[in-house]
Image: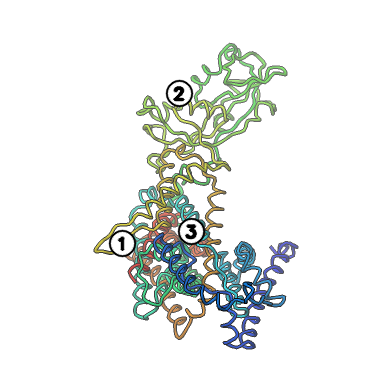
Amino acid sequence: MKELNRLPGKNTVRSVTLGIVSVLAFFIILTAGNVLASGPDQNTTKQSSIGMHDDGSMILLPAADTKKDAKSSSAKATKSAPTKAKASPAKGKEAKAPEKHYGPIGSIFAFLGSNIFVFLFLSLALGYPLGSVTVKGINLGATAGTLIVGIAMSLTAFMAYGITYTAPGLVLTIFLLLFMYAIGMKVGPQFFSGIARGGMDFVVIGLIVAFSNFLICFFGAKMAALAPGYSAGIISGSYTVTAVIGVAQSAVSTGAVNLPAGVTANAVGANLAAGYAVAYVLSSIFTILVIKYLPIVCGVDPVKAGKDAEASFGAGEDDEALPGSVGTSILGNSPMEIRAYKVEHQELVGQAVEDLFHKYPHAAILKIVRGDKVISALENPTLEMDDIIGVRGRYASLISNAGKVVGTEVDEPRVRNVIIEVADVYVGKSEYAGKTIEDLGQLIGFGLYLKSLFRGGTQIPHLPKTVIEKGDVLRLAGPKLCVEHAAKKLGGKPIIEGTVTETVWLAAAMVIGYLVGHASVKLGGIPFALGTSAGCMISGIMFSWWRTKNPSFGGPMSEGARSFMQDIGLNLFIAVLAANVGPKILNSFQGTVVIWIAVIGLLGALVPPILAWIYGFYFRKMNPAILQGAVAGARNHTASMKAAQEICQSDIPAVGYPVPYAITSALVLVLGYMAMVLY
């Protein structure tokens, strides 16, 4: 580890990070210096000359509002026309506005304003390294880093040079919806099956954390008389779920929120960003400490708890990745082995490979080398004396029996050079329903190893007497030709995790999600809608959940593509938000607002995990190590789960993490939307 610190790559990262921090510090100093030097009057002139808009242009406006604004602008232009005509010179030439001169530094900010593409990706390029700076094991993360850099540049441009940045609302909408769909694709496989696997305790823990966070943040903001947007922003920051900002913005853009007179969409966006930024930083630090040390505070030895949990899970079945999710192609530890033998026993001569498989179902001949010729077992050849055969079977059986039955073991790479793949196969033919795994193995199991069995998107034990049903998904490991042969027999096709994404299904799911979220229902004269962002997330959940039942549905979805879509969607949305609300952010920190955000944010971040711990530890007597993981999952905080693993000296806290995480990932977005609508 000490040697790693001297590697050039690490020094380079530190240098880049130091440079970014220096740039941000330069922005702040430059802003303060220019504001003091220019005075408020000059700054206001620069601002108005650029034309700052307060009309919520950062979001997509309803068609009726757009037409109304267009008519209003047209009317204003008509009224002002005579005035401009009188002011124009006699020769009919229009007067040109004086060209602005910002100086070398100001010209850079002006360029960013006229080329918003550069601004957005520069925010990401600087925000990612800033977010990776780690102090005592804690960092801001890429999202918070992007937000800070974007606001710093936008605020500096406005205060120092009167330049206002405006990113198109369509950009914000597209990347937000892509992010929400990607989140749905991630949690969907766990959302339904996790409840069945984890039991109701994990569900209750998730509900306790989500609803107590909402109550603290919503009514805390009410009691402090904070302006619209703060409560949802504090929920987002205290829960460290940035997507809440997106659904809150969606509530404003769809008209579900009636903003008070004088409050604009941009102002609400600034309040959201302010509440998020302060609460996020504080909750990121203190949530880790609380969840990490809860066992010690309660007099529990975390290391012993981890070992006890490992012992209780030791005899259990490995937790396989669900069909359609990342990790399905991992072979892992397999008891199967391919070894080479020379045929030396006369009773094998003249027998076909398929006949031998039915006689010895736990060993399959994959290849035969006869002189210089390599013969595939799928041709069903008959054996001859002195053939070299590649046999795949359980290691222990081959060691103890193969020499006696076949002959001497030899070193022949040509029969052992077989690529093993892992694929999910859907049981589509009813003729196999009712058969046991043992029966199925004798029928189609040639050269294959059954890694796991899924029913209704849930993993179930795959014992020899387990009965197969139509619609089950088998995860098979074996040579490609053997897997394809079995899939054809079962009436399905092998689904292998890869790098390809079926764009047609992605686009169709996004359209369905948008339409579902856009539809509204009036209750008591008040329009209620899921919102397009929540609609796209639900669409992702349903599509991915259905794929756990039938992995061929919807085509493949590369985990790399899903992860990129989630990452770039979220952080470009944040960069657009930073560009549009930068000038407004200072108004959000007036008076005692920062103090209230900090207090409410800390309470919303720390009280819910403690309540969940009390429920699990004192009432349900859950294992403390697993309970730590469940509480971290309910808080959507991976860093806390890693801290729990560190103090337990075990990976076992990860067992409790997925179910509460999947439930609260969706629930907190609904509650964030409601916080915006009901405030």
Q: Is residue 592 above or below residue 300?
A: below
Q: Quadrant of residue 606?
A: bottom left
Q: Residue furthest front?
A: 90
Three-letter code, disc 3: Thr
Viewer-side residue, 563 vs 658: 563
Label 2: few (<14), some (14–19) or many (≥20) C-alpha neighbours in 10 Å = some
The x, y position of residue 387, in whole percent, is 66, 17
Q: Can residue 636 be seen in this snapshot?
A: no
In the rendered image, which residue does mark 3 sit on? 173
The x, y position of residue 615, in whole percent, is 34, 65
* Position of the C terminus by quadrant: bottom left
Point out which mark residue 443 bears: 2
Question: Distance of mark 2 from mark 1, alpha carbons?
Answer: 59 Å
The x, y position of residue 415, in whole percent, is 65, 26
Label 1: few (<14), some (14–19) or many (≥20) C-alpha neighbours in 10 Å = some
Give me the residue at 49% from left, 19% from top. 359
Point out which mark residue 131 bears: none
In the rendered image, which residue does mark 1 sit on? 527
Q: Quadrant of residue 593?
A: bottom left
Three-letter code, disc 2: Leu
Sequence-first tag of 2 and 1: 2
Label 3: few (<14), some (14–19) or many (≥20) C-alpha neighbours in 10 Å = many
- Verify CB contact (< 8 Å) between mark 2 and mark 1: no
* Position of the N terminus by quadrant: bottom right
- Element under label 3? helix
- Is 307 on the left or on the right of 346, as rendered? left
Sequence-first tag of 3 and 1: 3
